[in-house]
Amino acid sequence: MSQTIKAAIVGTGFIGPAHLEALRRLPNVEVVALCEVTQELANEKAKVLGIPRAYTFDEMLKQDDIDVVHICTPNFLHFAQAKAVLESEKHVICEKPLAVKIHEAEELVKIASATGLVNAVHFNLRYYPMVRQMKTMREKGDLGEVYSVMGSYLQDWLFFQTDYNWRLEPDKSGDSRAIADIGSHLLDITEYVTGLKITEVMADFSTVHKTRLKPLKAIETYSDTKLQASDYAEVPINTEDHATVLLRFDNGSKGSITVSQVSAGRKNRLNIEIAGSKSNFEFNSERPNELWIGKRDKANEQLMKDPSLAYPEASALISFPGGHNEGFPDTSKQMFKEVYAAIAVGKQPENPSYPTFASGLRELIIGERIVESDKKQAWVKI
Ligand SMILES: NC(=O)c1ccc[n+]([C@@H]2O[C@H](COP(=O)([O-])OP(=O)(O)OC[C@H]3O[C@@H](n4cnc5c(N)ncnc54)[C@H](O)[C@@H]3O)[C@@H](O)[C@H]2O)c1
């Protein structure tokens, strides 16, 4: 492999450009190409984003100099695209969820492991330095035994009946929405930080908007185009706007999560509180430079992100001194740093530090059991 690793990005809606920006902050990576639905759109996007080459997906796969492909398309495309990338002997970083069905994710894990190629799933929220700090503190015994976990992930971008996106259509998004879309990040962080496995779930969903008004003409995200009543079709919605899930863990402890995409004013708020026998942790992704550490026998602590105050494992994810805030875009940069170190070597390490296709499969299994539990209104084993 040449010294500079050459990358391509498939899908340049919201998260594709976030991958691009993160990659541009790494010294040994060059994003040489992008793919879009049509050649015309690809050309247009390449111009806007300053990427030299534009392809449709199949054309991009034929380019021998591309080492790694980032898949940033709607969920239902991940399986076929990730499989094709591996089969063309390129490393792959796929957006979450890895696929929409468990058997698809299982197949991807199998193929990836047979090829030895680097495979990662973009569970980037693990890469907030304070999340790594919680994990490291737990590993070093600062938390003690885990008593309980309480988590939530709240958004409001689907609050109005007129809010519409492909994520509301199960053939594009999968059978679960709020849980698959954002609950997956929270469940991933829960197991990552605590080191525990979720063994059973009990879920209760609600679809607040039983129908939504789907725009009949394309409108750009965040544009202020005003639509008339006749510009919408009323369509039924059968995935969850909101979910509450009780959790049981393999050490006997319990937890719960609440996930909602219709919580006014909550823009993108992952909150996790982990109670242990020595202390409590609370982390909130809207204030990602802070970690609250609760104590029973002395004053509580507020740890500010600062490389000189964090454990070395967490400092490794910090690029700026204390008081210089880092946030969402930095999580992808920190994750790609670890993934591209593996790509530079040329193969998936035995114990990758980053989330892999196996992590993607794990979240699909938990997600599917959660959907099953809501349907049965009963506890379901993972
Ligand atoms: N990790 C995170 O924090 C995070 C955040 C947002 C989205 N995501 C994930 O990223 C994926 C994309 O989400 P988004 O919000 O960017 O969606 P989006 O709708 O904004 O963008 C999707 C892009 O894919 C393109 N596309 C569609 N079909 C294609 C095809 N066949 N070939 C090439 N391009 C194609 C679309 O034209 C569009 O540009 C989803 O799976 C989502 O779950 C992850």
Image (cartoon, rainbow, N blue to C red):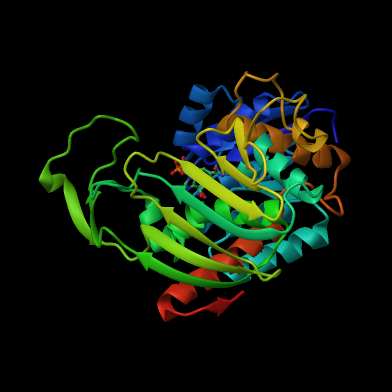
Q: Is residue 293 visible?
A: yes
Question: Residue 247 or 61: which is nearer the viewer?
Answer: 247
> Where does the image place residue 344, in percent across and percent down from the top left?
84, 37
Q: Split into 4 quadrants, where in the image is the C terminus?
A: bottom right
> Where does the image place residue 23, in percent across and percent down from the top left?
67, 30
* Residue located at (38% from left, 50% from top): 261
> Where does the image place residue 20, in percent across and percent down from the top left?
60, 30
* Residue located at (54% from left, 78% from top): 380
Tell me: residue 380, above or below residue 41.
Answer: below
Image quarter for residue 82? Answer: bottom right
Q: Split into 4 quadrants, where in the image is the N terminus?
A: top right
Q: Is residue 166 left or right of residue 66?
A: left
* Residue located at (85% from left, 43% from top): 346
* Residue located at (46% from left, 70% from top): 203
> Where does the image place residue 217, in percent across and percent down from the top left?
24, 43
Q: Is residue 154 left or right of residue 284?
A: left
Q: Is residue 232 left or right of residue 20?
A: left
Tell me: residue 231, above or below residue 253.
Answer: above
Numbered-mark total: 0
Q: Is residue 96 visible?
A: no
Tell me: residue 168, above or below residue 367.
Answer: above
Question: Residue 364 or 319: which is nearer the viewer?
Answer: 319
In the displayed image of the protein, which residue is found farthest to the front?
297
Image quarter for residue 127? Answer: top right
Q: Is residue 167 left or right of residue 249?
A: left
